[in-house]
Image (cartoon, rainbow, N blue to C red):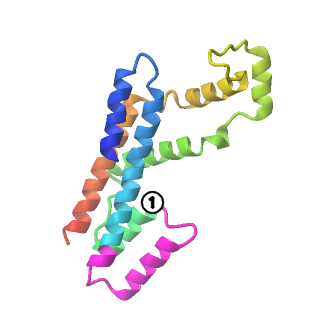
Amino acid sequence: MIYTATQFIKIARKKEQQEPFPFLVPSILLSFAAVEAGVNALIHYALRENRNLPPPVKKYVKKELEASPPASIIDKIQSFTYFLTGESFDTQSRLWERFQKLRKLRNKIIHYELEELKEQEVQSLAKVLPIKTKNGDSSTKTIRETFYKNLFSREVTIDRAVEASETASEILEKLYSFYYSK
């Protein structure tokens, strides 16, 4: 996933003068998804392979993984990693701060509809903005897409996508060192 995220960054760099945005969003999302998938795989590896785990720990972690809603990525990285490896992630580190920044940006992208323009606002804008589209899209659709892009124009950048992929790689390296050093 991180490899694909970096490929999207390369494409975005080539498209920088045109429209890099459509390549940066998936890059950021894939970087975060790599951490989620990686920590999940490591947890399942530890549950399967670590024969010295006390049964109550195994039972608790399995129960939390299957809960609805499931355990958060923060719980998996902090609590489960400690329960399963005895190692703690330094939550005061610069790396943890960067991961929290990535998590917040991912959540903002994924849950953007919470901040989306209301239909009445879109209709009002459509009346006062003379928007003509080349492909026949409605002006309200164009307004919504523009709002989405503008909402993230300062946050979804090539630098932020690079930071996201680097942060994901470093988080995974740290987690691997915890789980595989046992």
Work out whether residue 178 can be spotted.
yes
Q: Which residues lie in the magenta part?
A: 46-74
180 lies left or right of 82: left
Q: What residue is shown at x 71% (from left), y 21% (from top)?
A: 139
Is residue 112 shown above or below 60?
A: above
Work out whether residue 94 can be spotted.
no
Counting from the top left corner in percent of width and height, residue 48 is at 31, 77
Residue 179 lies in the magenta stretch? no
Where on the picture, by quarter, is residue 145?
Answer: top right
Q: Magenta region, mostly helix, strand or loop? A: helix
Is residue 59 shown above or below 19?
A: below
Q: Residue furthest front?
A: 135
Where on the picture, by quarter, is residue 6?
Answer: top left
Q: What residue is shown at x 37% (from left), y 34% (from top)?
A: 8
- Choose between 149 and 142: the one closer to the eye: 142
Q: Amino acid at mark 1?
A: Ile
Residue 69 lies in the magenta stretch? yes
Counting from the top left corner in percent of width and height, residue 180 is at 21, 67
The quarter in which the C terminus is drawn is: bottom left
Q: Residue furthest left?
A: 181
Q: What residue is shown at x 55% (from left), y 45% (from top)?
A: 110
68 lies left or right of 99: right
Counting from the top left corner in percent of width and height, residue 161 is at 38, 36
Counting from the top left corner in percent of width and height, residue 107 is at 53, 47
Q: What residue is shown at x 28% (from left), y 49% (from top)?
A: 170
- Which residue matches tag 1? 73
- Local packing at callout 1 (Cα closer than 10 Å; few below 14, some 14-19, many 20+) is some
Where on the picture, by quarter, is residue 102?
Answer: top left
Is residue 93 shown above or below 146?
A: below
Instruction: Give the structural element (helix, strand or loop) at label 1.
Output: helix
